[in-house]
Image: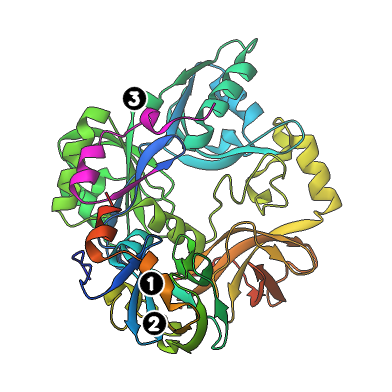
Amino acid sequence: MAEASYPEDLLYHAEHDWVKIDGDVATFGVTWYAQDSLGDIVFFDPPAVGTEVTAGEGYAEVESVKAVSDVIAPLSGEIVEVNEALGDTPEQINDDPYGAGWMVKVKLSDPSQTSDLLDAAAYTATLD
Amino acid sequence: MSASETSLRRTPLYARHEAAGAKLVPFAGWEMPVQYPAGIRAEHLTVREAVGVFDVSHMGEIETRGPRALDFLQRILSNDVARIAVGAAQYSVLCKEDGGVLDDLFTYRLADERYLTVTNAANHDKDLAWFQRQAEGFDGVEVVDRAADYAMLAVQGPQARALVAGLAAGGAEALPRRFRVAEATVAGAPALVCGTGYTGEDGVELLLAPDDAPAVWDALVDAGAAPTGLAARDTLRLEVCFHLYGNDLMESRGPIAAGLGWCCKEETGFIGSEAVRAARDAGPSELLAPFVFTGPGIPRQGNAVVGGGEVTSGTLSPSLETGIGMAYLPVEQAVPGTEIEVDVRGKLRPAVVKEKPLFRKGT
């Protein structure tokens, strides 16, 4: 998507992830800023369902033509679903980062960690 | 001491890149456009299918002139410089005594006793010092740093020649053929037009006075050339297996292992020729070979190859839509059709060694 956007109904991690909370399961993806910085995303290497992820540590890799980047987990837990479609269409991360470009769903091990996340205003303030 | 961000140099087109929304990044001491809003893939494919324009003003130029200019260049360049006619161009490498590669270069013969050699930006100062040191005690030759005198624009793609012809006084007749150079007036500015490039497509490179570069850039863009960044320049060159100094060429390896024996004429006695001859006679233990991934993943510079070898360039090919690269491989592995595995951050990715080039029109 061409225009920067940071939906108000999401929470954000300073490493340019977004989080959508649904009970004790959270959906993770990367923000508009992240996909714009990376440029054309051409490869998403998905983690396996069942993998434990730790807040602040990488859980997947995305590659643009030029570079590879770790995707940092904003919260800890166990991956319960992976967006397998990104294997064939990683460009969805550019085209629709908050929709079809979602990456994983995670059953949270410590839902209280969400208090460490940023709202849209606080996150966008980190981008300047 | 490394250059700080504030000391990065800017080309005469910096304001054009900024206005176009380019991502500008440090590259070889310059602040260069790595991509424009169209993105690497779109830029790449536009050059393959239509025409793009690159600002490559960071590249350097060294002029060698005088009655013994030919003798001097024959001594330091690997190719047979005597074979460059006035108005022609030639590719060569610059070797150290031990045969290690200092740079790879195009040299244009502008007049009987005048040659212009284009250097890689990161190597220009080193090359210039090498030229000057070798010229000491060599009567009848003058080495002149011309880097500040030229901006350089590469116009590349199947429509490049027609586009530039439309802006040139005298039209298509005024443009040089492939591997030739001619003086022409392009968009009102005097230019050295070189029938060379780094994309595998037809096209020209324009050497211009820096003050003229913005107006010529504007004319090229207005005529339909898409601004194209250095990232697409890299993917374009790698698809056709052109070497990139600092990745595929280095002082610690020689031209034979790099597959550049064709531009080394040891009988001319150039500096490093004895080492190159010895390497050619003995046969190299490793060879630079192109490869294509047969499954997922993207190879990157520095990835190890299982069983020995090292990736020196890697990317995702926008034309082939798969991971591609070049690697120095044990010579018995560097055979087209050989299946290899590349260790990409701990994951072994299958690949197959290919012939050059990896991409050819119509394949």
Secondary structure at numbered mark 3: helix
Q: Chain of mark 3?
A: B
> Can the viewer see residue A106?
yes
Q: CA distance from mark 3 to mark 1?
A: 58 Å
> Can the viewer see residue B85?
no
Instruction: Please give the residue where the numbered disc 1 appears in the rendered image.
Output: A114
- What type is the residue that disc 1 sits on? Thr
Given residues B138 and B349, the one toward you in this image is B349
Please state the horizontal and vertical placement of residue A23, each as a whole percent of the image: 36, 87
- What type is the residue that disc 2 sits on? Ala
- What type is the residue that disc 3 sits on? Asp
Please state the horizontal and vertical placement of residue B186, each as a whole percent of the image: 20, 40
Q: Chain of mark 1?
A: A
Image marks 3 and 1: residues in contact by CB distance under 8 Å: no
Q: Relative to A92, is B191 above or below?
A: above
Instruction: Please give the residue where the numbered disc 3 appears in the rendered image.
Output: B149
Residue drawn at x 63%, y 67% as measured from the top left: B345
Instruction: Please give the residue where the numbered disc 2 appears in the rendered image.
Output: A26
- Specify whether residue B23 is painted magenta: yes
Q: CA distance from mark 3 to mark 2?
A: 58 Å
How crowded pointer 3 is (Cα within 10 Å; few <14, some 14-19, many 20+) is rated as: few
Q: Nearer the viewer, mark 3 or mark 2?
A: 2
